Image (cartoon, helix red, strand yellow):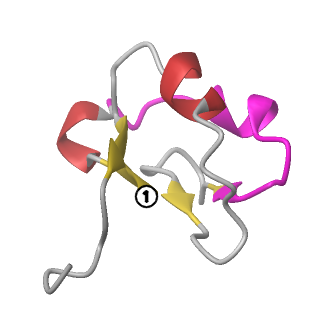
Amino acid sequence: MAIIVKEERCPQNHLCPAMRVCPVDAIHQAGYSAPTVDLAVCISCGKCVRACPMGAFQVVASLDPAS
């Protein structure tokens, strides 16, 4: 399981509220651009998914297309 950011759902005009709720600081943002999730650090707790009012954070089964 992994958490991804759907950039088309992120308005990219504010600081991402999900950064404040991530317990392992896996979410990073440059300026007001769409945030990124460091999958090596992310524990897939889902707090960012619940914190994003736009639904930009989504849980996916795997990032590996062979899975």
Q: Position of residue 44 (x, y in %)?
A: 60, 49
Could you tell me the amino acid type at mark 1? Met
Residue highlighted by disc 1: 1
Residue at the outermost front position: 67
Q: Position of residue 27 (x, y in %)?
A: 65, 54
Q: Is residue 56 left or right of residue 15?
A: left
Q: Is residue 19 left or right of residue 50?
A: right
For residue 12: magenta? yes
Location of residue 41 (image quadrant): bottom right
The crowding category of the residue bearing disc 1, from other C-alpha atoms within 10 Å (few below 14, some 14 to 19, many at least 20), is few
Q: Please report the residue visible at 29 percent of the width from the left and 73 percent of the height from the top.
A: 63
Q: Please report the residue visible at 42 percent of the width from the left and 49 percent of the height from the top.
A: 34
Q: Is residue 14 left or right of residue 63?
A: right
* Nearer to the camera, 38 or 67: 67
Is 6 placed above or below 42 here? above
Q: Please report the residue visible at 76 percent of the width from the left and 40 percent of the height from the top.
A: 22
Asked whether residue 49 appears in the rendered view, the answer is yes
- For the N terminus, the image quarter is bottom left
Q: Please report the residue visible at 57 percent of the width from the left and 70 percent of the height from the top.
A: 39
Q: Position of residue 3 (x, y in %)?
A: 45, 52
Which range is magenta? 11-27
Location of residue 12 (image quadrant): top left
Residue at the outermost top position: 53
* Nearer to the camera, 57 or 34: 57
Asked whether residue 16 appears in the rendered view, the answer is no
Q: Position of residue 33 (x, y in %)?
A: 45, 51
Q: Main secondary structure of the magenta part?
A: loop
- Label 1: which secondary element: loop
* Nearer to the camera, 14 or 56: 56
